[in-house]
Amino acid sequence: LYCYLESVIPCVGIIMGSDSDTAVMKDAAMVLESFNVPYEVSLEVYHYQLSAF
């Protein structure tokens, strides 16, 4: 299932910061599916140096 910006049906984005979030987010996806809410999942991993801030 892919959600598009042009879609008139709202779409929920599940954004994970690491693979370790998968177990919790899988439960969130199951709840969305039970209510027939469209969603998409994205794994966004950013690496940065704390000293840069």
Image: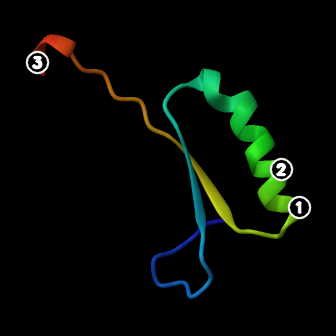
Residue at position x 61%, y 66% in the image: 2
* Residue at horizontal 57 percent and vertical 70 percent from the top: 3
The colour scheme of the drawn protein is rainbow
Distance of mark 3 from mark 1, alpha carbons?
43 Å
Mark 1 neighbour density, 10 Å: few (under 14) some (14–19) many (20 or more): few
Q: Element at badge 2?
A: helix
Image check: 45 left or right of 25? left
User: 7 and 32: which one is in front?
Assistant: 32
Q: Is residue 44 above or below residue 53?
A: below
Crowding at dot 3, Cα within 10 Å, few <14 / some 14-19 / many 20+, comes out as: few
As drawn, the label of residue 30 is 2
Q: Position of residue 26 (x, y in %)?
A: 76, 39
Q: Please indicate whether residue 23 sits to the left or right of residue 20 in the image.
A: right
Q: Which residue is mark 1?
A: 34
Q: Amino acid at mark 1?
A: Ser
The residue at 83%/60% (across/down) is: 33
Secondary structure, mark 3, is helix
Residue 25's place in the image compared with 1, above or below, is above
Quarter of the image holding residue 32? bottom right
Q: Which residue is mark 3?
A: 52
